[in-house]
Image (cartoon, grey):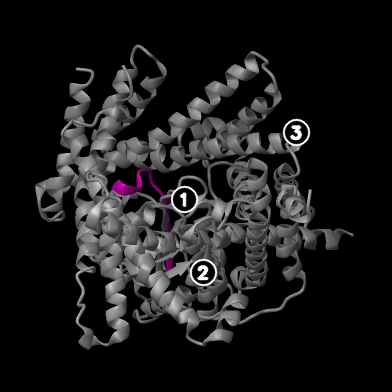
Amino acid sequence: MTFFGHFEIWLSAFLVLSLFSFLYKDNPFYKMAEHIFAGLSAGYYVGLIWQAVIIQQLVNPMFDQGHWWLVFPGILGALMFARFFSKWSWISRISLAFVIGNTAGVFLISQLHGFVLPQVVSTMISLNPAQGFAATLSALVIVIGVISTLIYFYFSKEHTGILGGTAKVGIWFIMISFGAHFGYTVMGRISLLIGQVQFLLFDWGGSIKQIF
Amino acid sequence: MNFWEKVSGMDRRWIYLLVAISVIFPMLVVIKFPVQITPEARQLFDAVESLPDSSVIFLTFDYYPSTLAETEPMSVAALNQMFRKNMKVVTMTTVPLGGPSIAERVTRKLAEKYGKVYGVDYVNLGYKANYVAVLKGMGSSIEAIYPADNTGTMLKDLPLMQKVKNYNDVKFIYVVADNGIIDYWISIVNAQYGTPVGAGVTAVMAPKMYSFVEAKQLTGLLGGMKGAAEYERLVNHEGNAIRGMDAQSMAHLLIIFLVVIGNIGFFATRKLRRGAQG
Amino acid sequence: MRTTLPVAVAFLSGLIMVVGFFMNPEKTFFGNVEEEVLQWVTIVGGFTLLLGVVSIVRVNSRVVSQKRKDWIYNLATLISVFAMAIPAIMPISSDSNFGSIFYSIFPESWSFLFGTGTYSIYDWLFNYMDSPMMATMFAMLAFYIASAAYRAFRARNAEATLLLLTAVLVMLWRIPMGEAFLRIFSDSLPGYINTYVMSGVNVAVQRGIIIGAALGAASMSLRILLGIERTYMGKG
């Protein structure tokens, strides 16, 4: 490994350890690393938007291919910055409305067509015992679980009587699902730690071993 | 103060130390329990494997650097399978912080290993803003949304992109994601254009995804590092996920132990607390 | 004007998407309009990310110029923003006017350092500083979740006990060691957890939540399109 290769790994390791030092207590190394991280991330956006949007989607098509009409989204984008001038900030609403309205239009269809319909359709399953015990049990679990969960989250009527009883069943289902969620969340968080420990032990450790 | 009160009031830093040991120790002393394959991971593997060689496949890098440990092994394993099958891979990202850099780094490394040529065997489209519009827009024309690839080369100059105009030309979409973008690959792309979508997601997102697998809106699922380890085993490529499984096991066992001890302490001291209140 | 114009823009922008769903995007004039609008949205969307950067620079510059407490950290943030951004927006060849001026000052052999490509300063700062720090920030959550599990995960009542038991079962099932342990009781036990917990009860609950949330999102979208929901415009 070259000197520069070692330097890269040691720099990363120093920053990683600076951040981990917060686990013991807050300290200047942590604060410095945290602020550098925020700055670099913001700077990353600038480079990305400059290359991927301003150059590739605006400047090149307008000047090289004569797509002059792209000046309009360019102006709409620039109007976003009117937010920083209190007198003119309302102008930025036009650009925002253009993006939000578009997303709402896509969502209005996709939420119903892409989520509600397929999920409802796959809940309409056969409960016929002739299909065998295991299949019937699975189907029952799905049907009862979906209905009771929906009722638990239905707040327009007081949860009493049949509604209350079904909501009670719903909460038992929800607890099992949230328990599974918690188990998975623990797994995810531990995995992220494993990734950083692998870096410190094998990459940084390897570099230490080579140097000393 | 009795024993259980002391245990219940233990300084959090002792717990942190135990967690650190539980992760570091198994990496030094390798035990290697076999990784069992779940039906969802097998389904994803089979879906890709059953495609004809040289098919065009989309691989997305919809994840931030924060979840690299879970997601990157999935991308690496998937690329191993795709390049081995000589598939034509188009990569892209909807994540603004790091997505394009990660996609570039991972694909170039794997392409070098398999001797693949950029522009012919694979293309990295990079990033474009507003993922809902990006996903919807690519349905009619990829070139309208991505006039150029990640490095600025015009799509018309890339041979592979001459035959990939929109989702109709894509056989399968393999999404690796750590955020809600997977919902839109399902509700916009799969639902409206009919292209099959398979997913590798972080563990936190996995429970929700089971619902889409059951509804056949997702063709296969990998959940977290364990899912990545399963895929590594399926494609016969031992990577960071399989190597991390021992540490994952020990840390889980420690957390279960902590939950048990915490509860014993809670019940043992409850009487004392009630006595003090009464 | 201040609210009517944005409401009208949102309505039109959304209407094109709703109507476009029912048309063949490749064969109709309307399909072309939809394609163009989507292209515009991706461009305008890019600018929204820059808003955040301008905010960060403004806030930190103010702290540094007024030399408030711990201003040195804010200075580090500012330096980092510019260290990442400036090399990234520099030209990578002398083809353009700006490029020819730039490379009359710097040797053209340095061009690989600029832009956002592999080996650029931008890419290096991301790979060796930004990326490991972001990964570490999230890795620290492992410690916090362990501490939280120890202090707060209590079997206080029947519901909490059910949640706790499922969590423990899933934690065991998702690790090779735990799965081997579960197989001691029955070889089919891990399969049952997958079938009845994850693909059974969990699917039912998630499905209920997905249906509910999607209905909510669709009605919110309709409110935005009709101009009833205007909170996204902010005050004033």
Q: Residues within 10 Å of mark 3 (few under 14, many from 20)?
A: few
Return the chain for callout 1: B
Q: Secondary structure at mark 2?
A: helix
Q: Which residue is mark 3?
A: A28
Q: Quadrant of residue A2?
A: bottom right
Q: Residues within 10 Å of mark 2 (few under 14, many from 20)?
A: many
Question: Does the magenta segment cover residue B131?
Answer: yes
Between the C-alphas of marks 1 and 3, the distance is 38 Å
Q: State which quarter of the image contains the C terminus of chain C.
A: top left
Rendered location of residue B275, percent (x, y)? 66, 46
Which numbered disc covers residue C170?
2
Q: Is residue C33 above or below residue A116?
A: above
Q: Residue at point 50% right, 45% down?
A: B97
Q: Which residues are magenta?
A: B121-133
Q: Which residue is mark 1?
A: B151
Rendered location of residue A208, percent (x, y)? 83, 58
